[in-house]
Image (tube, rainbow, N blue to C red):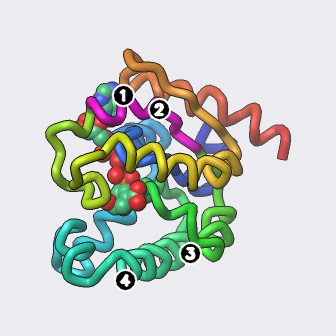
Amino acid sequence: MIDLLKGVNLYLIGMMGVGKTTVGKLLAQEVGYRFVDTDEIIVKAVGKSINEIFTENGETDFRQLESDVLGQVCAYTKLIVATGGGIVMQQQNWGYLRHGLIVWLDVPIQIILERLAEDHTRPLLQNSDPQGKLSSLLEQRQHKYSQADLHITITATETPEEIATRILTTIPSILKKS
Ligand SMILES: Nc1ncnc2c1ncn2[C@@H]1O[C@H](COP(=O)(O)OP(=O)(O)O)[C@@H](O)[C@H]1O
Ligand SMILES: O=C(O)C1=C[C@@H](OP(=O)(O)O)[C@@H](O)[C@H](O)C1
Ligand SMILES: [Mg+2]
């Protein structure tokens, strides 16, 4: 697998809560790549949580930081990159993502809601109608996510380990196509 990838980065995209950060760490271990998370880099660079950045700086600033970080990250090789769910909405970001292989983790909204029910770290869901918000975000984003090289549809019972294994077993088929 490592030989097949030839150092090419893997970018995980998809809605918040689909498991990009969790599965990304496992993939990095399996492939022997470094793991990076664009949210984590932003938090370290700014010295504020994602919630604080959204509240104090605003989403527009966050999106600029996200693009800056992605632009810097894509200069490196041998990375598994977990992105934030909204990264697909800036056209400029696709130029960066296309440096590597793009994997869309696709999980039904109902499962995401259950996973994030007690989570307060996603500012876009801190309102009275998280289900409505997730639905409208997915509607805006779905056609962007669908431009990934690999679409992984995840069931309610699939573990992060099983998902990582499935991604790694499917990659050879998309590499042959390109
Ligand atoms: N396959 C899975 N099965 C059950 N829970 C999961 C799975 N993948 C992720 N989670 C949980 O869902 C939450 C969101 O996962 P996370 O990796 O942060 O998603 P993302 O980075 O896509 O927002 C975390 O609590 C994580 O432990
Ligand atoms: O979907 C989004 O717009 C966001 C997703 C979050 O990352 P995760 O997808 O890792 O939760 C984080 O970047 C921010 O809260 C905004
Ligand atoms: Mg994440």
Q: Is mark 2 within 8 Å of ligand 1?
A: yes
Check disc 4 and give the amino acid type: Asp
Residue 160, percent across and down?
37, 29
Viewer-nearest of labels 4 and 3? 4
Check disc 3 and give the amino acid type: Ala
From the image, tell me which residue sits under label 1. 111
| Residue 6 appearing in the image | no
Label 1 to label 2: alpha-carbon separation: 7 Å
Earlier in the chain: of badge 2 and badge 4, it is 4
From the image, tell me which residue sits under label 2. 107
Q: Are marks 1 and 2 in contact (CB under 8 Å)?
A: yes
From the image, tell me which residue sits under label 3. 75
Label 4 to label 3: alpha-carbon separation: 22 Å
The tag on residue 34 is: none
Q: Are marks 2 and 3 in contact (CB under 8 Å)?
A: no
Q: Is mark 4 within 8 Å of ligand 2?
A: no
| 77, above or below 67, in the image | above
Q: Is mark 1 within 8 Å of ligand 1?
A: no
Label 1 to label 3: alpha-carbon separation: 34 Å
Disc 1 is placed on an element classified as helix
Viewer-nearest of labels 2 and 3? 2
Q: Quadrant of the N terminus?
A: top right
